[in-house]
Amino acid sequence: DTQFPGDKVSREQSAPLEIKYKEHPQKDAIRLVATTQFPNLEMSPSEANFGCVLNDTQSTLTMTLTNPSAVPAHYSWSFAPQEGVAVDPSTIFDILPIRGVLAAGSSETVELTYKGSIKAKSKALALCSVVGGPTYSLPMAAESSDINYKLTCPIGTSTSTTRDNCRVDFGLQNYDRVEEKEIYLQNTGKVLLQYSVDKSCLSRTNVVEVLPASGNIQA
């Protein structure tokens, strides 16, 4: 049948069968239904976007692999070759388990890992081949970057300001007076900025309070 799809996707097909009788005006119709079953898989999510991670660190995502068909699915993962790219995608991305068997109607969790390098953007196309079924594509993308931030003090607060140094001058104050100053910490990079205040360099740590003393600033 030239009209039969060759994509190896399970589906139900139906068509009418008309019955005519010789030397009789009556006509009957029968609906024919057939189901073709191939080992199929469903991926959720259908792509792996790791976003931007800190240089030389790893990031892991999880994906649910489901067999919606009525037969077992034997699968294995590989990476599609990329033109003009000398780096093997398997040295940047990892998939576990790399192969397996999913029973009909069952699901399992697949671990996707990005092994970040230094200031790099990476893309790959992972292929999940199913024995007797189709081959599925999983686009993968990731980026790695360093931490960048800016520390600034409002006018009248500081005598000097650099990217990582903000000198706060409270001036001469009465011993019973509480004086407040503000400084601004800005995340100018592409990755999460985690910070904490270290007062160990102060001669009298009990006279200075910094709020918040720690936190996270999104990119």
Image (cartoon, helix red, strand yellow):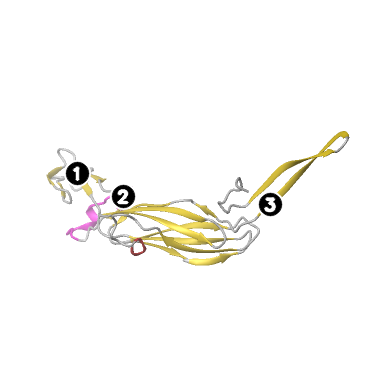
Foreground disc of the pair 2, 1? 1
Q: Residues within 10 Å of mark 1 (few under 14, many from 20)?
A: many
Residue range corresponding to the magenta coloring: 201-219
What is the C-alpha distance between the residues marked 2 and 3?
63 Å
Residue that mark 3 sits on: 35
Residue at 67% x, 48% y is 12
Which kind of residue does numbered mark 3 sit on? Thr
Residue that mark 2 sits on: 212
- Whether the magenta-drawn stretch holds residue 86 is answered as no
Mark 2, secondary structure of its residue? loop
Residue that mark 1 sits on: 152
Foreground disc of the pair 3, 1? 3
User: CB atoms at circles 2 and 3 under 8 Å apart?
Assistant: no
- Whether the magenta-drawn stretch holds residue 205 is answered as yes
User: CB atoms at circles 2 and 1 under 8 Å apart?
Assistant: no
Q: Is residue 172 left or right of residue 25?
A: left
Which kind of residue does numbered mark 1 sit on? Thr
User: CB atoms at circles 3 and 1 under 8 Å apart?
Assistant: no
* Position in image of residue 11 (x %, y %): 64, 49
Quick one: label 2 or label 1, which is nearer the N terminus?
Answer: 1
* Position in image of residue 187 (x %, y %): 27, 47
Quick one: label 3 or label 1, which is nearer the N terminus?
Answer: 3
Q: Is residue 217 left or right of residue 75?
A: left
* Quadrant of res 72: bottom right
What is the C-alpha distance between the residues marked 3 and 1?
68 Å
* Position in image of residue 103 (x %, y %): 62, 64
Q: Which dot marks residue 197? A: none
What is the C-alpha distance between the residues marked 2 and 1?
16 Å
Q: Is residue 74 left or right of residue 11?
A: left
